[in-house]
Amino acid sequence: MSKNGKIISKLFRGTVVSIIAATVAAMIGIVVDGVVIGRFLGEDGMAAYTLVMPVVNLATAFSGILATGAQVICAHHLGAGDKQKARRAFSACMIITVTVSVVLMIIIVFFKDPICVMLGAKTDALLKGSTDYLIGVMFALPSVLFLFEFNALMRLDADANRVVVAVVVMTVLDIVGDLLNALVIKGGLFGMGMATSISYGIGLIIMLLHFTKKDIIFKFSFKGIRFKNYLEIFTTGSSSGVGSASAMLRVAIINRILVGVVSAAMASTVLAAFGVVNTAINLMSSIMVGIGMTCATIAGLMIGEQDRSAMISLLKVTVKTALIMGAVLAVVTFAGADWIARAFSDDKSEEMIRLAARGLRFYACGIILYGINNAFVNYTQGLRRMVISNIYCFLQNFVFIIIPALALSGVIGTDAVWASFIITEVLTMLAIFGLAAYYKRGIPRSFADFLFVKEPFGVAPENAFEFSVETQKAVIPASEAVREFCDNKGATDKQSYLMSLFVEELCNNVIEHGFNDGKEHSIDIRILNTEEGWILRYRDNCREFDPVKWLEMHESDDPTANIGIRMICGMAKEVKYLSTMELNNLTIYL
């Protein structure tokens, strides 16, 4: 028997890789476009590509709102054991996505020229290039919206491998399509956009095949959807929208700051350099966003369960992962800045390469802090502390960048923009510590000081007994410890005996039937003494296994067989079982 919470760390590590892969894939098409455009279509092509990025950011703003809103709400309802509410949230999200996709495409078709002019296309060459790319990539926007959402939801529906397959297929097709366009078809910027649209569309089809399966949680239906379901998605996902919208405005303003501090002859060069830096930032930040999305999803589940110790375990593993990934990205980016910049260039623009490499090295210095700060924003979003999440997201992604860039641009020129990437992360981190100090009324010293949950939350520590079982020999000590805890908390002799026997029988059954696949597994159990009665919460990371249904299917003539499980279930006011994120979750209310 060991300390409770190991499953949360294992779940996080097992989930974060596929979520990072999918979030990177959501940007990889745009990044590949940037590399190929820079290599084969020159500085003007790269400048036109850069000008269109705010529109792509707008699409990702909507996808962030819908994906994170649906993800957090569904995780919250599933954590509370309510499949029907989770399905209504999913269905509402699908309706909104179709509507937003249609509206975005109509706006682009009819207003492509004014949009590109507003974004800074002042020459005929820039206008033609930017409109060509915008029309080509327009068809990818619905896929971007759906892919973000399915990336989040399919983990809750135990189909994470499908996301990985879709990511690999989509990435390979996009690279092949871009190279064919550049070397064979010669389709220019329009062809680049279309290659991305086609690859994203095929990735979406692979995702949609998930819904042909029978035993899935998320099934579309108009039944029971109310206006509040739509509103709930937008409000819960609002911080993702704030982040993406802030990024869109930030890019537009920084474009103007950069153009304002250089000569007219250098405008295309500095815009192309910023395009390289911004594209690299989008790709690397998507890795950190994957960490944050994982944190938000699991936080939503734990909020539904009111599990304080699991929340602390989640914070620890999130920060540790952000530190490790941030350190790796920082070293790679700083050391490889010249190589990255040259990947986007035809080697004729040495000044653009120099500027881009300098910007990348500045950004590398703030990546670690960015990962932790972004995880905080996502974590508070998972808690549905939307005011905190929105404010900090806006500060990090806009205010703390734009104000220093504007203030310093007259003094240090283009370096003002690059330096602002570091300044914003330092200021955001200080603001997070300030909030924790405010809530604690003192200096925060542990992860528990950064929970930011709405109190009262869960049960008092003295009324909860939590532990993990990983081996057969730990079962009996765990059962004896349960009985001792129940006796000390005023349970009747019958309740104490049956709860300890329940734990013993259930753990033995799970170890016998779920630990035999050669993988590492764990069982987390919580015994809660509440004013309404006793609550038993059980969680394991084995294959799908409902112990109550198993008991019904293996009913024995022996009256003593599985007596603890049978009697506890018979005494229960309510029994809830749910399989989500490849976890078995059982809650029994006595």
Image (tube, rainbow, N blue to C red):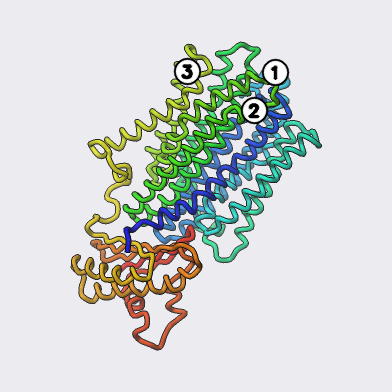
Q: Quarter-wise, where is residue 307 in the image?
A: bottom left
- What element does badge 3 sit on? helix
Mark 1 lies on a secondary structure that is loop
- In whole angstroms, how far apart are the C-alphas of marks 1 and 2? 26 Å
Q: Amino acid at mark 2?
A: Arg
Q: Between residue 458 and residue 163, name the one nearer to us.
A: 163
State the residue position of label 2: 342
In the picture, which quadrant includes the N terminus?
bottom left
Q: Which mark is residue 416?
A: none
Q: Which residue is mark 1?
A: 123
Q: Residues within 10 Å of mark 2 (few under 14, many from 20)?
A: many
The C terminus lies in quadrant: bottom left
Compared across the picture, whether 9 is left or right of 498 comes to right
Dot 3 amino acid type: Leu
Q: Is residue 166 above or below residue 267?
A: below
Q: Residues within 10 Å of mark 1 (few under 14, many from 20)?
A: few
Q: CA distance from mark 2 to mark 3?
A: 28 Å
In front of the other: label 1 or label 3?
3
- Label 1 or label 2, whichever comes before in sequence order: 1
For residue 539, say whether it is visible: yes
In the picture of the structure, the residue carrying the numbered disc 3 is 406
Q: Position of residue 512 (x, y in %)?
A: 44, 73
Decide: few, some or many residues near mark 3? Use Cα within 10 Å; few <14, some 14-19, many ≥20.
some
Residue 399 visible in the current orientation: no
Residue 576, image quadrant: bottom left
Kind of residue indicated by mark 1: Thr
Residue 497, horizontal then vertical, whole percent? 25, 75
Mark sitting earlier along the chain (1/3): 1
